[in-house]
Image: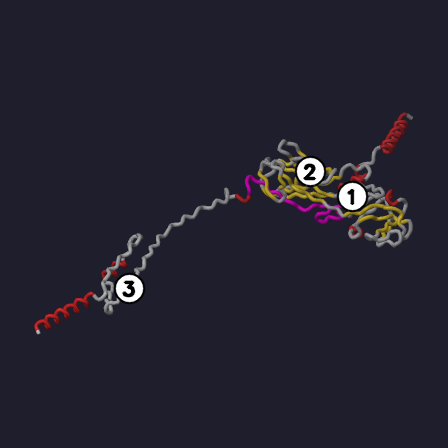
Amino acid sequence: MADNSIVVCFIMVTGLFLMFCPVSAADAISTISAGNTVFIGEQGLDIRAAMDGDSTLGWWASGAPIASASPDKTISVPNPGSFSIYPSDFQTHIGSWYHLSGPSTPNGTAFTVADPYIDIRIEDTTVSTDVTNKWVPSDDELRFRIDTNFVQMLQRANVNSVPVTIKVRGPDGTLFSGLTSKSGQTTSLVDYQLTTSPQYTNAIWGTSNRAMYPPGTYSVWVECNVNSIKDNYGQTGKAVSSTVTVLNQDQNPLIGNKGYVTNPTTSTPVATTRTPTPTVSTAVTTSPPPTTVSTPAATATAESSAATTLPATAAVPAVPTTHTPGFGTGLVVLSLCACLALFLKKH
């Protein structure tokens, strides 16, 4: 009898515990009340409270007269305790869905369907700079910024956060499940809890630990698989973010050769000697016609001298010799005149 009494008491205590213990987070995030937001890709939702006893959902295009027009799309709900928002049914029908009391009579809002999105950025807290797809010195600390509309799940009863997983892959292919800060504190990247958007992590990644984080390019992304949403809707940017990178190394990759030093080019000046062109002056006179005096051609000696290479010096132009035109002819005329005078005097 004593043994039976113990068994009965154990069963009663267990039953009371199950009756009064709070709903688990997993169950709560799957339970949808009227007017909650659900996301394309979610699976196994309990929408009994949202359906209020009805078994058909209806959707009207934006601007349609709901009270008088038939719904543009209807979906039968045979099992409201486990309902899925499959992309094939809802991807082109975003917005409010109503539970119907008849074939086309709206009986209240069941839920609102939203297209999910998620994004991640990397920030260097040492210098307060966004380093997404850039580089960081191997001594700085990093944090992540996550933007998403999954925080609308916080509308659901007893849901205080939304779990996501941050993925970090090292240059050698290692996938990190946690990161360690410069102070030595390790933060798990699995089921990281979001409570707002954008949400910033602490400075959880200390890049100075060379043994743990060797220099190289790291790939980072974030994903959410609440209610199997990633499994059903794994498009990039939806339940899985785009992959971003960060290069961890000692110095700026743009100056990997110690600074793009350009060797100066020394130009050797070439002396250019310009030989001045002699100016030929022509004297105009009214005396008897000038006799043209031919200038003798340059001698072989002069040519030989000109051919000799001399050091580059400034050339001094030679002053040409000036001849008075008709000087010889004048002497001949004067001699003839003198002879004529003597002849006439004798005769």
What element does badge 3 sit on? loop
Residue 92 percent location from the top left of the image: 78, 53
Dividing the image into 4 quarters, which one contains the N terminus?
top right
Amino acid type, label 3: Thr
The quarter of the picture where residue 126 lies is top right
What stretch of residues is rendered in magenta?
Answer: 227-252
C-alpha span from label 2 to label 3: 95 Å
Left or right: where does residue 12 sit relative to residue 131?
Answer: right
Q: To which residue does mark 1 refer?
A: 227
Q: Nearer the viewer, residue 321 or 297?
A: 321
Residue 91 percent location from the top left of the image: 78, 51
The quarter of the picture where residue 278 lies is bottom left
C-alpha span from label 3 to label 1: 110 Å
Amino acid type, label 2: Tyr
Residue at image point 77% right, 42% down:
152
* Closer to viewer: mark 2 or mark 3: 3
Which mark is on residue 200? Answer: 2
Residue 27 appears in the rendering = no
Q: To which residue does mark 3 refer?
A: 282
The quarter of the picture where residue 276 lies is bottom left
Residue at image point 90% right, 29% down:
8
Which mark is on residue 299? Answer: none
Q: Nearer the viewer, residue 111 or 274?
A: 274
* Closer to viewer: mark 3 or mark 1: 3
Residue 275 percent location from the top left of the image: 32, 57
Residue 235 versus residue 10 in the image, above or below? below
If you read the primary sequence from the N terminus, does the residue marked by circle 2 or circle 1 appear first? Answer: 2
